Amino acid sequence: MAPGLDLSDSRPLETTNRPDEWKIEQGLHGAKIPFLDQTGDVTVEILPREEPTPWKEGGSADVVQNKDEEFKQEREGWKGYVEWEAFPEKKVKAHKILERLPTRNPEYQMGPIPETNPVLEGTNFKKWHHAIAGGLKDEPESSWNTVLKEKHPEMLHLLQFPYNGEPPKRLTTAKAVTPNNLHFVRNHGGIPLIDEEKFSFDVDGLVNNPQKFTMKDIMDESRFPRVKKMIKMQCSGTRRIEQISLYAGQGDEVPQAPWAEGAIGNAEYVGISLKKLIKACGGLKDGAKHLEFYGADTYFKNNEAMNYVVSVPWSKVKANEVLLCWKMNGERLPAIHGFPLRVMVLGYIGARGVKWLYRVKAIENPSEAPVQSKEYLYFNQQVGKHNQVPTDGIQIQEMPVSSAIMSPWQTQAVIHNGSIHCKGWAYSGGGRWPERVELSADGGFSWYPVPLENMSKKHKFAWRIWEIDLPCDVEGWIEIVCRTWDNSLNTQPLNVRAAWNWGLHVTSSAHRVKVYSINKTKPATAKKLALFKKTGSPLAPITWPEEFTTQTMYEYKSFWEKHDPRDVDD
Ligand SMILES: Nc1nc2c(c(=O)[nH]1)N[C@H]1C(S)=C(S)[C@@H](COP(=O)(O)O)O[C@H]1N2
Ligand SMILES: [Mo]
């Protein structure tokens, strides 16, 4: 018998409470909960490491002499571009510096999300750039200046460096075409500033005639037909905050940028089909199946320095669904979105749309670069930190159908006349598009379709924004749910739990928003609301104590005179 089950157990019980014990016990501070190791005879608590690993100032960076020369800016007129992929020995030197530079804990991991804007600072990435120095020395400051110059003042900066930002909800779906300064940004490194006159990019690898192209070359309409298209760009981390709030996942400050519903944008791009460019290079050699794209920014992972590199299958390129673009909504690409040239992969996750493109390489298999092979993987729920290997994950390419409610907000109270006005977006991946958006005011039992005239125009690779007056009779807390059906009749799983995965990617479940319904068409509510107005008592917040009496003693007594008493005797 376990000693505690014995009624005569007289062992003294020690207490070791800390002031935040209650929060920890209740799971409100996940990062502070000890693990329980039950594999031995007695259960052992494994305490979480709390204090950040201290930075070791000085010394560490000195393992490489003359860094300004070693890691110099690669090309004249290309600020912030250091070439890593062509120089393995340079990568080795960077690794030496990085491995000696301890990483501080990310700014939040299962802890409260800071109440600042920028939400997270990105201390690790700043330090790494400063430590490598050379052509990367000024990147953290220079990138932030570009943000301030090119982005709307109301952007929500989730991570200052590498810059990750999304528009607030009320601006995300304010227009069917996202203005450039409100388009979300997802960066893995700094923002290279490239002089167009000095720009060219290479097409090489398994192509018959490797070539260099300038902007002038590819803008020559006699050589390459121009393509203009409405395209939705969206990160596989969009709506990640719902997965974060449910369960902790991959705990790195960059992949875990706590995206809400704004990591999506819709814009009209101008460019050329990559297929035509491959043709101009004499086509592919036998065995070439993927096109690898190289971005001029620097990314750091596991103490390695690298350029941003990913790939897409040739079949996608062959279908004319991979574009090289230089215009966004009628303007030249902003620096932050990849000036002078970026890739757009229609219907795929944003991650394949490489910005600051400087090389296209035809290869045999999907890229082995870490962003392709080790990140953007979609794991099964039972696969995670202690058992995952990259081959367990599906490489995320085409996105599934999804949607989001942008108004009302989570926990918002709405006073209405029997229907709640809701707004949001819907999209699908791979060249499928939203055909029907449905909303439910009762947690997903009954569904009302958004009237077709309340949806923005259909395009194969664009989103649709929508509005609906959602009937709602009841009062109190309700759950508004949104789901979309695409033209292939795919729809969204109903719960976040069904979409949760260790990488916290592709939150494609039906979007759920808790709303407090106040229905003014109900006589009692209308009467009470009038009283609020008359007394000047605040309506918000919902928890504000009621400042007036709701029933006089006279009214109370006369009620019981006309009704059965509260208690009965027999
Ligand atoms: N060179 C480069 N290209 C990149 C990235 C990057 O960090 N570097 N991020 C990718 C990711 S993950 C996304 S979601 C999109 C975001 O594009 P946007 O910033 O123009 O919205 O760019 C992709 N292209
Ligand atoms: Mo992304």
Image (cartoon, grey):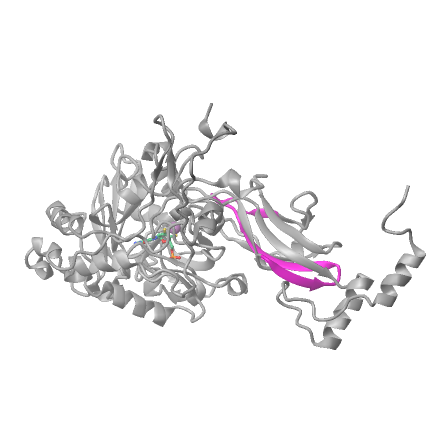
Residue 414 counted in the magenta span: yes
Q: Nearer the viewer, residue 445 or 384?
A: 384
Specify whether 406 is left or right of 82.
right
Q: Is residue 71 visible?
A: yes
Image position, residue 303 (x, y; %): 21, 47
Residue lying at 10% horizontally and 61% vertically, measured from the top left: 68
Specify whether 170 is left or right of 144.
right
Residue lying at 61% horizontally and 60% vertically, measured from the top left: 412
Q: Quadrant of residue 124?
A: bottom left
Instruction: Report the quarter where the C terminus lies.
Output: top right
Q: Is residue 168 above or below residue 374?
A: below
Q: Is residue 23 above or below residue 524?
A: above
Image position, residue 495 (x, y; %): 56, 42
Q: Quadrant of residue 181?
A: bottom left
Q: Is residue 509 above or below residue 272?
A: above
Q: Nearer the viewer, residue 323 or 258?
A: 258
Residue 220 counted in the magenta span: no
Image position, residue 488 (x, y; %): 56, 39
* Magenta stretch, main secondary structure class: strand
Q: Is residue 450 visible?
A: no
Q: Quadrant of residue 419?
A: bottom right
Residue bounds of the magenta highlight: 411-436
